[in-house]
Amino acid sequence: MQLLGIVIVLAVIAIAGWLAWQRNQSRRLEHRFGTEYHRTVDTLGSRAKAEAELRTREKRVERLHIVPLQPAQAAEFARRWEALQARFVDDPRGVLAEADRLVREVMLQRGYPMADFEARAADISVDHPAVVDHYRAAQAILMRNQPGQAVDTEDLRQAVVHYRALFNELLEVQRPAPASTTQPMEKRS
């Protein structure tokens, strides 16, 4: 009888530990992904499914070789973005398409795979959850900007602003390694 009591106590402790671990995992994912966590829960219909999806994203992105840009690359991309923005007044539809292409080019240069949009957004959400909503909003406007669709200039401007938020996040630059501040050891005789 005493053995049965010990087994029951151990089972209760194990279940409590597992539940605490689950709660911590949920909090960690919610903190890391922010609004993307809630969007995924809403889309998939349950926390368990959403959390499994977010963990899958994390594992997939861990296997990718995402790298920061070299300073010269980042400067060139920034120059191209400035030129793109300067043309907005004359060609807002063209600038929107170019903004999409430039964001994709930066993503590719950083090492993100260029699968379909949802896969790109999912990958971006792992390291840049604060701006993935901007990417989704810009893409939605881009899709509405097809021939025959009525998208006004303000919508086009807003899409470029959304793309810029993601673009600025993606311009992470590789920092040079700090020079060693240690002095060489003196030889002792």
Image: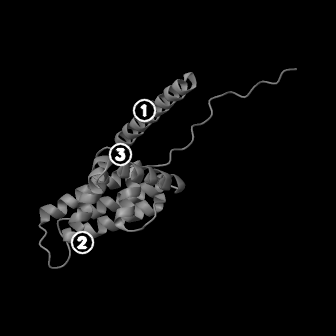
Foreground: disc 2 or disc 1? 1
At label 3, counting other C-alpha atoms closer than 10 Å, the crowd grade (few under 14, some 14-19, many 20 or more) is many
Q: Amino acid at mark 3?
A: Phe
Q: Is residue 30 left or right of residue 150?
A: right
Q: Quadrant of the N terminus?
A: top right
- Counting labels gives 3
Q: Nearer the viewer, residue 155 or 20?
A: 20
Could you say which disc has been placed on residue 33 in the image? 3
CA gap between label 2 and label 3 equals 32 Å
Q: Amino acid at mark 1?
A: Ala
Task: Label 1: state its secondary structure.
Answer: helix
CA gap between label 3 and label 1 equals 20 Å
Q: Quadrant of the C terminus?
A: top right
Asked where in the image residue 188 lies, by quadrant, the reply is: top right
| Disc with the residue nearer the chain's start (3 vs 1) | 1
| Disc with the residue nearer the chain's start (2 vs 1) | 1
| Disc with the residue nearer the chain's start (2 vs 3) | 3
Can you give x and y, in whole percent of width and height, for residue 184 in the image? 72, 28
Looking at this view, name the residue that lies furthest to the front.
Answer: 1
In the image, residue 188 sits, relative to residue 34, either above or below, namely above
CA gap between label 2 and label 1 equals 52 Å
Residue sitting at 19 percent across and 68 percent down? 92
At label 2, counting other C-alpha atoms closer than 10 Å, the crowd grade (few under 14, some 14-19, many 20 or more) is few
The residue indicated by pointer 2 is 94
At label 1, counting other C-alpha atoms closer than 10 Å, the crowd grade (few under 14, some 14-19, many 20 or more) is few
The residue indicated by pointer 1 is 20
Residue sitting at 41 percent across and 59 percent down? 76
